[in-house]
Image (cartoon, rainbow, N blue to C red):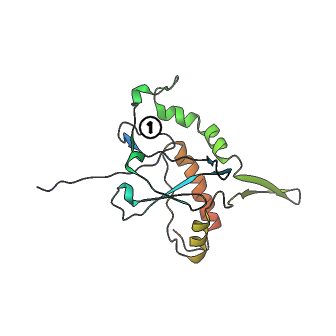
Amino acid sequence: MLALVLISICFSSELYGLVEVMPHFIKMNGEVSISDENVTTGQIFILDQNCTGGLADIKACYYDGTEITLKENALQKAEITTRDIDRGDYPHFFLKEISESAVSIKRTLRGKYRIATKNNSLSQVIFNLGANIVPAAVKAGLQKGAIKNIIVIGHGTAAVAGVAVADALAHYLKDKNIT
């Protein structure tokens, strides 16, 4: 007897919008503090398009490139359902998330860009893409041409932020032959 196993991986800023169809999750910690080194860092998860979908296929590291080994206990089961979500006066959680997206994006982008004025007339957005945003290993891969394809995925407000990230990457990497 042949059993077919379908594995889906979705990204979301919160699990609320996906909890009914994706009850298992791995939580990524955005900005976390490493107390021993007095450093704040975040996490990056890398999925190869040819992966089978298991934990072993997810490469994870901190922004500085330090590897993270994901163990079985990293996979969690949500203890909520969509019935448990406070939607306020909105009939659907997605409508609430859309309505709050401007504030969410503002918080997400805080400190990640600045607006510079040239000659007192022309304003330009300058992105902070330093080592705390783009890890050294990713930067090296881009410089050496080892990275050929970048996919930005998001759900809800993460999708809106993802569009901004994709636009920034397209602008800064336009001559690098990356799709």
Residue 12 picture location, percent across and down: 48, 45
Taking the spot 39% from the left edge, 32% from the top edge, the residue there is 79
Left or right for 130, reference 89: right
Point out the image quarter for the N terminus: bottom left
Callout 1 crowding tier (Cα within 10 Å): few <14, some 14–19, many ≥20: some
Q: Amino acid at mark 1?
A: Gly
Instruction: Identify the secondary structure beneath mark 1.
Output: loop
Position above or below: 75 against 95: below
Taking the spot 60% from the left edge, 53% from the top edge, the residue there is 164
Exactly how many numbered labels are in the figure? 1
Q: Outermost residue toward the right?
A: 120
Residue 31 picture location, percent across and down: 61, 47
Label 1 belongs to which residue? 17
Taking the spot 59% from the left edge, 35% from the top edge, the residue there is 100
The foreground one among 176 and 56 is: 56
Instruction: Choose top left, top right, bottom left or bottom right for residue 84.
Output: top left
The foreground one among 113 and 125 is: 113
Q: Outermost residue toward the front?
A: 36
Taking the spot 49% from the left edge, 60% from the top edge, the residue there is 151
Left or right for 87, reference 126: left
Left or right for 172, reference 158: right
Residue 66 picture location, percent across and down: 56, 60
Q: Outermost residue toward the bottom?
A: 144
Position above or below: 27 against 124: above
